[in-house]
Amino acid sequence: MGHQQILESVNADAIKSGNFPRMDIGDTINVHARIVEGEKERTQIFQGTLISRKGRGISEMIIVRRVVDDIGIERTWPLNSPFISKIEVMRRGDARRAKLYFLRDRVGKSRRLRDRRRGLKHVSGTA
């Protein structure tokens, strides 16, 4: 058994399996994040476009971008974080790249991604 396989077997029980829907790059998602303020705890929803996924297993990270008042806001989360309670896919976007960093330079209507409604019947994990 190699070093990588030993690490994956140790981390296998800490991975949240089956908790999240299928999400691809370009999708508009809602990330329900738990916020702890003093003794209170609340859930805050961050809605934006999924522009990057990197890593795998326990170290998988996502970057979600949204634009508020013409200012781009990006948040990076580990997928297996205890602070993420739920992720919902709101809209499927048609992206032809693995990383959508070019959206940082776009302004106006060119910032939007084409909707991917056609041909999703055969994709598993879609409603």
Image: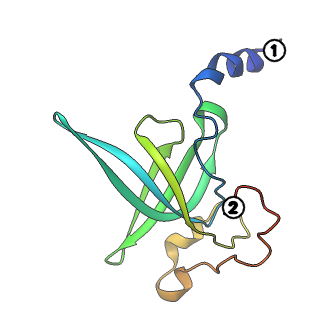
The x, y position of residue 45, in whole percent, is 37, 57
Report the residue marked by disc 2.
126
Q: Quadrant of residue 57?
A: top right
Point out the residue furthest to the bottom here: 109
Residue in view at x 47 percent, y 83 percent: 107
Residue in view at x 50 percent, y 70 percent: 104
103 over 45 or under it: above or below: below
User: Secondary structure under badge 1?
Assistant: loop
Residue in view at x 75 percent, y 21 percent: 4
Q: For the residues carrying marks 1 and 2, which lies nearer the camera in this image?
A: 2
**Mark number, residue 105:** none
Point out the residue furthest to the left here: 38
User: Residue 102 vs residue 86: left or right?
Assistant: right
Residue in view at x 70 percent, y 60 percent: 98
Report the residue marked by disc 1.
2
Q: Quadrant of residue 82?
A: top left
